Amino acid sequence: MRRIHAFIEDHLGDPDLTPATIAAVHHISVRTLHQFFRGTGETVQARIRRRRLERCRAELGKTGLLVHPVAVIAARWGFSGPAVFSRSFREAYGVSPTEFRALSVKETRAHRTLR
């Protein structure tokens, strides 16, 4: 199971990362893959989505000179398009990616002024 989790982590940016591709690479059936995940409390696809969203959230929270557009971040972490990403992000975190970034910038500025 560790190899499967590591494979998912290493390929989060691949938009073609699916249970079928993961199963094929590990020479198991999709059904077996889903059975492995049954005990984790989330499906294979849910884990992929959650980890992608966590990576995107970390990037959106960064401030500084190298701030990438939301669409670029979404594509980098394997989302099929900005609308799909925005919908998933809002569902997971309660705000849009753009709103999250704005809040992160505000928090960073507030933290700097408190020093």
Image (cartoon, rainbow, N blue to C red):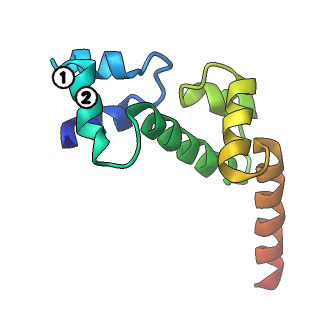
| Tag 2 residue | 33
Taking 36 as reference, is 54 above or below it?
A: below
Q: Contact (CB < 8 A) between labels 2 and 1?
A: yes
- Asked if residue 15 lies left or right of residue 91, the reply is left
Residue type for callout 2: Leu
Q: Residue at x 30, y 39 (%)?
A: 37
- Looking at the picture, how far across and down is residue 39, in whole percent? 27, 47
- Asked if residue 100 lies left or right of residue 5, the reply is right
Q: Residue at x 81, y 59 (%)?
A: 103
Q: Circle 1 sits in a helix, a strand or a loop, which is it?
A: loop
Along the viewing direction, whichever of 113 and 31 lies nearer the viewer: 31
Q: Residue at x 26, y 23 (%)?
A: 31
**Residue 26 numbered tag:** 1
Outermost residue toward the left in this view: 27
- Looking at the picture, how far across and down is residue 44, in whole percent? 38, 33
- Asked if residue 66 lies left or right of residue 99, the reply is left
- Asked if residue 14 lies left or right of residue 81, the reply is left
In this view, the mark in front (2 or 1):
2
